[in-house]
Amino acid sequence: DTAPGMIPCTLHGIIPGAVSDWNAENPEQRIERGDSILSVNGVSGDLTEMLTRIAEDDTLSMLVQRSKSRSQSPAGSRSQSPVGENNGLPEENP
């Protein structure tokens, strides 16, 4: 379940760019089809503004919710994981 006021942007595929670069550098924390972006650079609840932040901002900090099939892994992975960007590639925030 998402937090109140958060409208998820569910990913239907990954195209070349920051997310595919992140996936190549962080194979154990891949963002995949079915995952949802809940916020971008502090913006949530406004899908148009979230997409604008992705297109226009040089540095990204995203809150990503794993798809249900991925969040129910035996390792008990978190259902939501923050992702930031540093030097063009995202990294997990503490």
Image (cartoon, helix red, strand yellow):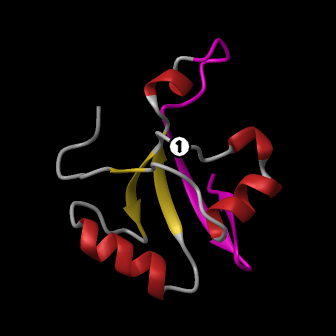
Residue 2 falls left or right of residue 22: left
The residue lying furthest to the right in this view is 25
Q: Measured from the top left, where is residue 66 in percent x and y? A: 49, 36
Residue visible at 60% across and 26% down?
A: 77
Residue 90 falls left or right of residue 62: right
Q: Measured from the top left, where is residue 55 in percent x and y? A: 46, 82
Residue 58, quarter of picture:
bottom right
The residue lying furthest to the top in this view is 74
In front: 24, or 42?
Answer: 24
Count of labels in the image: 1
Q: Quadrant of the N terminus?
A: top left
Residue visible at 28% across and 39% down?
A: 2
Q: Measured from the top left, where is residue 25 in percent x and y? A: 82, 56
Please name the amino acid that badge 1 sits on.
Answer: Arg
Residue 19, quarter of picture:
bottom right
Q: Few, some or many C-alpha atoms within 10 Å of disc 1 (few <14, some 14-19, many ≥20)? A: few
In front: 81, or 8?
Answer: 8
Relative height, residue 55 to residue 23 (above, below)? below
Residue 32 falls left or right of residue 41: right
Task: Specify the segment rendered in magenta.
Answer: 73-94
**Helix, strand or loop at disc 1?**
loop
Residue 50 forms part of the magenta stretch: no
Q: Measured from the top left, where is residue 78 in percent x and y? A: 54, 31
Residue visible at 41% across and 79% down?
A: 53
Residue visible at 69% across and 60% down?
A: 20
Residue 86 forms part of the magenta stretch: yes
Residue 2 falls left or right of residue 56: left
The residue lying furthest to the left in this view is 5
Q: Which residue is mark 1?
A: 33
